[in-house]
């Protein structure tokens, strides 16, 4: 799209990125306003575009899909008044795994389909790993796709199901689908939530007055004042109608494999996972890291903002003072509008500035959440040295990211991942820092609450990005030539 | 202006706000790009609108003034290409003290005037306390004002000066002006910087290659890669032409009275003032506060983001762990676009969320930079208690704000200031917290480096907002009925 | 759509409106530019929105669909550069017969479908009279509709065809379709044009250099400098590939029934139909009208702009001087952007003004093309009398419009048509004019070249809006309760 | 301004253009709505930008100045609601004679000034021929200009006047001014109209209910339903307050010299001048032209739209049938938004199309209002011949335009005027037509009602563009080297 802003955020290329957040509500007057608030709270899961679908008995289904942040795209009276009703769902997205090039508005979810028994809309967080094969088959049978999104398969599979009601059609459809999915869907009267059998992506249930809400994270319940009830189970489908929540188990039971990176980076620090705040888990990672990789230094500084909780933990465990050595420009947002070449080249300086007077002459431990391509880490190291630091030690709150994610996270191709081609020592040299240490996979498991570390026979989490062990075979990717890790 | 976004930021009403940032550069190809970057770094000093004026020998003066953030308003090729030249100045603003109601684009600086010997543009940070009287006199003599800004007086006084060159006309004009001003101005070939005799507002000089820059704060030198040379002295005018900086002293010498609130809140933590980072000063305020007002508790949490450095200092001095108990939504920005009533009413929740799982059952010390009206403090207290905190103790990194500022800071009328009408104990009760303590004025002076505290005979800073002692009589305000503090 | 302008054009409600124009080109570098020009020339056939699809071997299909006039929506470099390729089609539209309420962008054509053997796009002028039944059947079989447009049925029927190539699939699809259609379609390499068996709507073929063009009217060939070759025959499909035009006859042969209202009002006066300029035909209608309905008067004035050619003919035949008694404001455009109530109420005055000094005391013959609801005619009469005319005589260049059109023209419901409920005399009284005469149906046939008038056994044109004789049964409408004319 | 649309209208370069229209109203609720309507009716006098100033006792003066057509810029509730009050003035403009390059919003009138006794706003149609000299003098005395407009001098002269009220200050100012001006101005309570002593530009007075209106033309009275009372006299100032119109005569009496080109082209055909409709005058010019320059032919065709009335007159006098041989695209508007190169090059075809089937083989008389550069005439001739016309005869409804206008009309420099460098015969050859005839200056005077033709001793009109006889010496131009016509 010619009119999309160019991102100049230097970190955008150097982070794994969650691709979607979903939210739904039923039984609430002006549901769309609650959805907008919920999506605003989930904005960190997708900043490119968003959509809301609602249903009102008088005016039927209404939909608005727009580029931009929720605070801009989904708050004006003129937009929100077009979305009446007490039930609705919403979605924020970064980009679909399948799309080449820029997003088009037709790729923005929720997707809607009119079936013989009425309409349904769905919003999907995750990625369907056999979407290419499904799409090919559906097109051959006469389905017309409107988007390049893997998620659209689900609605076409539903349209062709012979089941008589929509929840049953959705079960039919999802049994054909492989991969990771947390889905929020709706009919005229039902709000539906589903997680894939492994429960890779999060989905939680909340209650607000007589209404119910489904959300990717608890922080989206907090913003609307909803009470957190429970997480949707892996492999569970809940159908909410007439104020009642009914639970279904449409899939064969499997051991869950929740995404461990949600703890490391994706989820918001004020969300809770398994009863503990994500902030505390990240702080605990810092504690583990201080034990595994101590170093003598003057200051512990986070790479803002995602390194902050682990840096606080590292400081508390090590006794080395915590300080804000790097300041983030809060007016950066994600993008500059078509900046000039000169401005574009300023890169990291537009976003960060070193606290020069503080850093000068100091031995500094920098704590970051992850190293993906390593391009940002190098720039930050240069900024810190340029400001006169005596030593720079990197401590990373996740193991080396050596494998791409195919379950709804935007990762570079494998050869672009620094850890896929270099040892820890080579990376240290490449980054030009005095020391570089990643937390171990066992250390990470301990921090998230597995006291014995990782059970290599049956890991409790999906950690494919670190281990290369994919719990669901990425069949479309294998078809395109992706090489799985050789058996050891 | 009908098309200005409505601010729903609950903090906007409950902070003192710096009203302007200024920046200028000379001797740099594509000066406008450097100015845009500098203004971006100074965005915290004014978010409503900005302007840039440049001069190119071939095409003359060019000007662009726009509402919105620099990253949106002053980065596109289409705007920046209209601003050619190697010399230029810029301005970001919140609102002028004199304006009633919303800002109009004609109020946005820099202001430009065509004089008999050529054009000049000026950008002003501060406030002229005798502007009403000057304006009345100028209109009576036939000047036509285009704005409601106090700063426009300067350019009319310059137009009527009988001096033969622009720097001399500026001296003439500024000698008629009372109040606080840090000014960056330009002619076709000269970049000019001036600070009022008391040096109330900051202004610094930097060098970049063969060029020079003037900026409100050092962080704006950092972003363009300029080296910090020195602060402009109170009462000094520098005229930069042909690569040379010439210093003038147009005013009678006075003891300087720099704004102490720049240390507390206005300046960016990564700027340096008097050779020390603002971050360190704020952390030192937290240390003083911990000494003055200790309390037994489980966690020290900042009110984000401005309370963070003092909270870190408080934690380090007290030994009570520092934690992020309140998380700020980084996608909030300053505004929602015309939100619906329902969204508007969400107020503080749109911006902040309590880390519920972390806070539950804890005794929490909340560190904030200041209390103005107290409205936000009450809401935050409610959020924290609602999340299950056992106790809430407020510690404030500045003394009670009991007097309005008339030197370029947006403050409520005196009767709206909580500290103007209540004692500390009444405030504690009003806020409904377990304890409330402000740093003492002496403690603040110690933290900014005055080991002996405040010299009440001859204070080193302007602290009128705390003390009610105004170093320059606010004559327009007195004319309108403002009552100075009674002599003791 | 909340952001669509409100039309205040008083005539919009009082005219029959052509709903679409189509255009396609192949073998031309930068095809999209030619399409934009062609659509600009066809803008009178649809002003609400337009779309262009092109195909380029390197980048595949590209599409842009936008609200607004072609001159605004499809001329900027930023849009046109997204539409590369040497083949493409375009569409301008008013509104689909099927839509309730406002158009959504998803209703804007061309429609695109990805089939197993590649993609195709189609643009449709006309209306499918069995679209509701087809849609129901397709949804039951699992098709998902994206629009409320009747035209989308065609692409779904094509998707489900078992034929191996796209032209054959289109034949399959169109054999299921009833109603009126002139279609321009494209694959990666083929430009396709089709007219329904009765040839209700126009479609012409032109040649430009080595390329070919298809257009609703010849004026769209003129604007790109193409030579008019011939009209596509009723029931013909042309497939243009590799510079060759191949003709197919997929339908059973029928006697053609071209829309006679294209002569009266829809087509542009500088287009030619059957070898004669539409202007001349309209002038000939005026001549017939002067013979059928003479009256003694001082001036013949057109109701601008559509009454002008007939008024010239009337003047020339009658010898009564032609004069511009009513002046149209050329800056009216079609719409005012959200005007205030007061402006909205000005209605006809915003668009027309009477030449008061000219009209005063005169007996005036006003020539208009048609009377639909009669609301405008009343207002014009009032304006003329208010300006001091002595007498007002209406002469209408078409017979009374007593029946709605179901073949791609926007008409009010039958009960809103003045002629459906009143005799000519009652209408004269209702309008309050000195005399009112419509041309006879025979007179109209004579003017369009049928020397013997209308052959009531086998009329040469579709004249259902005048006669109530529908050449294709409007089956969806009958299902909804529309009563056909009783057999006489 | 980077965001102004590029005009691709081929005629824009080949017409003299009126530069302004003015309108004012007092005593009307929601005055701004009436002003918007009046300016809409005057849009032909200036399409680039417009402005409205109103005054309301409670909220004071309000102003809105915007680029674009009135129908877009001044009709939305959101704009109009910012303009409360019962008194106000407005202005539409093309461009000021003095501006180099593109218009800036600061050049858009009305101009407003705050004086010691209150504010005043003025809107000016015409041109001040000694503006450069006045501006220089005012700047030297300390006035600061905000625009590049000649009209701004008036407000500065008023600001410096020693008179005690605004009408007297305006008299003071206008006595210093040379050139042509019709001015509408306002204070908080008074609506003021003035015409220069020669009355070069028009200004009329109307009454509506208890309110009064001033307008450039009567068509702007018609649109708001006001009754035409009289023309303001040359040299007259009317001051309207409390429902009363008081007439002043501030200037020395002179013989009037109204612009004859207002009859030929500038004024709308439905306005009346001197009691006769402009349409009738133009038709009478056609009659004179048919007498002066008859030719044997088949059709008389206007060059649309401005040649239409003269063509009708020519046809009626000559007996040769009138026909619409060239059709104007009514969706052209004035501009395409940043069109691609290819679209830009289509030039005249975007706007006009020849009625090929009608023109083929015919001898055609083309009637146009004027020839300026001749560029358009050549393109039209080519289109007509390309369509197969047998002969092309140009008849021009004004004498050869050989001199630039300095009284508020946008004309090319003298050397660009075809008639300044060629004889009629050379022009005929240059245009490549079978014959070319201009109406004589005497013929034109007869058509406007001077039965004896032009009185060369004391002409009744300003006809400097034809005769080179300037009734007011263009002193700024002479200073810049413009050579007046040599005395004969």
Image: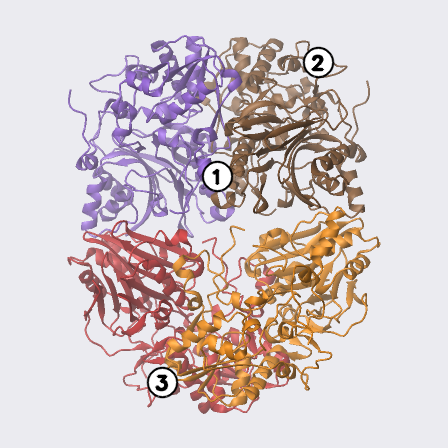
Chain colours: A red, B orange, C purple, D brown
Instruction: Specify whether residue C381 is in view.
Output: yes
Q: Are marks 3 and 2 in contact (CB under 8 Å)?
A: no
Q: Residue at x 39, y 83 (%)?
A: B390
Q: Output the chain of dot 1.
A: C
- Circle 3: element type: helix
Give percent across and percent down for residue B225.
65, 70
Instruction: Give the labeled residue for mark 1.
Output: C71
Give percent across and percent down for residue C389.
46, 15
Instruction: Give the labeled residue for mark 2.
Output: D454
**Between marks 1 and 2, how big is the CA–CA gap?**
45 Å
Give percent across and percent down for residue C317.
41, 9
Left or right relative to C82: residue A55: left
Characterize the local packing of mark 1: few (<14), some (14-19) or many (20 or more) Cα atoms within 10 angstroms.
many
Q: Output the chain of dot 2.
A: D
**Between marks 3 and 2, how big is the CA–CA gap?**
102 Å
Instruction: Give the labeled residue for mark 3.
Output: A445
In the image shown, does A188 or C98 lie closer to the viewer?
A: A188
Left or right relative to B474: residue A460: left
Q: Output the chain of dot 3.
A: A
**Between marks 1 and 3, how big is the CA–CA gap?**
61 Å
- Circle 1: element type: helix
In the image shown, does B97 or C133 lie closer to the viewer?
A: B97
On screen, C266 above or below A70?
above
Q: Residue at x 26, y 49 (%)?
A: A58
Q: How many marks?
A: 3
Q: Are marks 1 and 3 in contact (CB under 8 Å)?
A: no
- Circle 2: element type: loop
Tags 1 and 3 both on a single chain:
no
Give percent across and percent down for residue B315.
51, 86
Disc sitting over residue A185 in the figure: none
Left or right relative to B276: residue A433: left
């Amino acid at each position: 799209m010619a009119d999309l802003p160019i991102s100049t955020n230097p970190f955008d290329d150097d982070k794994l990125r969650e691709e979607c957040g979903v939210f739904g509500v039923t039984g609430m007057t002006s549901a769309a306003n609650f959805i907008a608030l919920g999506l605003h709270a989930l904005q960190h899961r997708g900043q490119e575009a968003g959509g809301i679908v609602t249903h009102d008995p008088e005016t039927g289904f209404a939909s608005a899909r727009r580029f931009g942040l929720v605070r801009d795209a989904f708050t004006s009276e003129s937009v929100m008044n077009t979305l009446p009703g007490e039930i609705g769902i919403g979605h924020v997205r970064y980009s679909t795994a399948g799309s080449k090039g820029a997003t088009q508005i037709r790729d923005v979810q929720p997707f809607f389909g009119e079936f013989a028994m009425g309409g349904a809309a769905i919003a999907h967080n995750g990625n369907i790993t056999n979407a290419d094969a499904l799409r090919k088959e559906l097109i051959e049978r006469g389905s017309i796709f409107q988007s390049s999104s893997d998620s659209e398969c689900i609605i076409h599979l539903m349209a062709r199901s012979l089941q008589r009601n929509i929840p049953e059609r959705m079960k039919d459809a999802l049994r054909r689908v492989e991969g990771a999915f947390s889905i929020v869907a709706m009919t005229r009267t039902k709000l539906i939530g589903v997680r894939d059998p492994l429960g890779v992506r999060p989905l939680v249930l909340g209650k607000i007055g007589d209404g119910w809400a489904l959300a990717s994270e608890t922080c989206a319940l907090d913003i609307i004042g909803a009470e957190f009830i429970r997480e949707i189970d892996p492999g569970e489908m809940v159908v909410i109608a007439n104020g009642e929540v009914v639970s279904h188990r449409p899939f064969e039971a499997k051991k869950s494999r929740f995404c461990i990176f949600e703890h490391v980076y994706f989820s918001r620090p004020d969300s809770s996972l398994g009863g503990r705040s994500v902030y505390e888990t990240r702080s605990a990672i810092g504690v583990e890291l201080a034990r595994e990789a101590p170093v003598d230094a003057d200051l512990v500084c986070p790479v803002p903002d995602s390194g902050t909780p682990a840096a606080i933990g590292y400081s508390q465990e090590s006794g080395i003072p915590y300080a804000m050595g790097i300041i983030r420009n809060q007016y950066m947002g994600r993008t500059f509008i078509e900046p000039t070449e000169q401005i574009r080249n300023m890169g990291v300086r537009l976003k960060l500035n070193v606290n020069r007077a503080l850093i000068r002459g100091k031995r500094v431990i920098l704590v970051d959440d992850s190293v993906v391509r390593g391009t940002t880490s190098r720039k930050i190291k240069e900024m810190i040295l340029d400001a006169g630091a005596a030593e720079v030690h990197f401590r990373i709150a996740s193991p080396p990211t050596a494998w791409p994610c195919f379950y709804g996270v935007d990762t570079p191709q494998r050869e672009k991942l620094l850890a896929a081609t270099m040892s820890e020592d080579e990376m240290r040299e490449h980054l030009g820092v005095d020391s570089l240490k990643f937390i171990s996979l066992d250390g990470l498991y301990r921090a998230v609450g597995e006291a014995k570390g990782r059970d290599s026979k049956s890991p409790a989490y999906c950690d494919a990005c670190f281990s290369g062990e994919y719990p669901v075979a990425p069949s479309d990717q294998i078809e395109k030539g992706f090489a799985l890790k050789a058996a050891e």
